[in-house]
Amino acid sequence: MNSIYVNYLTPLLKWRVMDLESLRSECDADPNYSHFARVIRKMEKANVLEGYKHRFNGKKYIYFSHFGESQLAKEKNPTAISKESLIHDIKVTEIARNFIKLGWIDQITLEHELQNKRDFRAVYKVIPDALLETRREGKKVQIAFELELTQKHKQRIKEKAKQYIINSRYNYIVYFFSKESVMKTYIEVISEAVGEKNIDKFLFVTDKAMTAEVTELDNLEGICHGQKVLISKFLMGENGVKEHNSDKNSCSLIR
């Protein structure tokens, strides 16, 4: 692994799985696409990387093999992506990177990074798919992000929601779903678990085309306390440093 190859792969240490063009665009050297693709194929043959061709959007996604992660990752517990969770991880990365691109969030830490932070589980008790961080009126705001492509057992849903409320370090929780029926179940179960006074900390979002297409976040709405609210408004608020020109009648949360 020479320095050029390491440079090409550095973004994967953060994002875990990326399509070829997204990975190339985040390389410091801004490599020629043909050369970049040849290097990626070479590393696939060397079992450093694995590839996945998305059957709907046609993009090729790249992620570390167990061998590749053991060679490059400096984490205590390197955990290569499993094929069973690949679609889930692709969507978490896609949505998280777009939160950053749109300027709605300042920093994102994915689950694999949280698992390797010293005492994170002991302090936070529950680990989301991603931790979103921003600042409002000079104060740090931390938002748990969860992507649910399938419905978990109701008791598990309840327990996780309760842990989010018990732990004051999480200010808000955002759930994304690919099916409206699953979202409705989560709203019902979580509302019962956390009570009326805490349910406005949760935003529930459905994107029915999630597994087939890029999620268009700009005008996507979620449900907060029974009201529709733009995701941007939930994350950024109406006033302060991150002002967003949204419908004043929507649920205004970060304050």
Image (cartoon, rainbow, N blue to C red):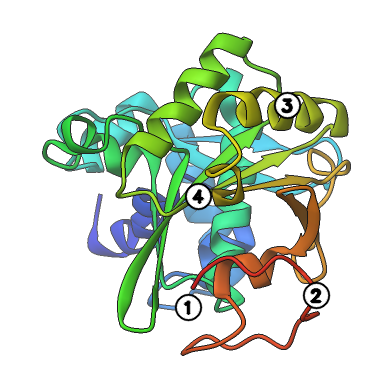
Distance in Å between CA atoms under marks 1 and 4: 14 Å
Q: Which mark is residue 40?
A: 4
Q: Amino acid at mark 3?
A: Glu
Query: Mark 1 or mark 2: which is in front?
Result: 2
To which residue does mark 2 refer? 249
Distance in Å between CA atoms under marks 3 and 1: 48 Å
Closer to us: 118 or 52: 118
Q: Earlier in the sequence, mark 3 or mark 1?
A: 1
Q: Amino acid at mark 4?
A: Ile
Q: Amino acid at mark 2?
A: Asn
72 with respect to 227 (left or right): left
Closer to us: 20 or 86: 86
To which residue does mark 3 refer? 188
Q: Residue at x 34, y 35 (%)?
A: 166
**Outermost residue to the left:** 118
To which residue does mark 1 refer? 30
Query: Mark 2 or mark 4: which is in front?
Result: 2
- Residue 201 in the image, given as x and y percentages of width and height: 54, 50
Q: Which mark is residue 217?
A: none
Q: Residue at x 77, y 69 (%)?
A: 250
Q: Is residue 48 visible?
A: no
Local crowd size for mark 3, using a 10 Å CA cut-off: few (<14), some (14–19), many (≥20): few
Q: Earlier in the sequence, mark 3 or mark 2?
A: 3
Local crowd size for mark 4, using a 10 Å CA cut-off: few (<14), some (14–19), many (≥20): many
Q: Earlier in the sequence, mark 2 or mark 4?
A: 4
Query: Mark 3 or mark 1: which is in front?
Result: 3
Depicted 130 relative to depicted 178: above or below = below
Q: Residue at x 66, y 22 (%)?
A: 189
226 with respect to 197 (left or right): right
- Residue 197 in the image, given as x and y percentages of width and height: 54, 44
Q: Amino acid at mark 1?
A: Asp
Q: Earlier in the sequence, mark 3 or mark 4?
A: 4
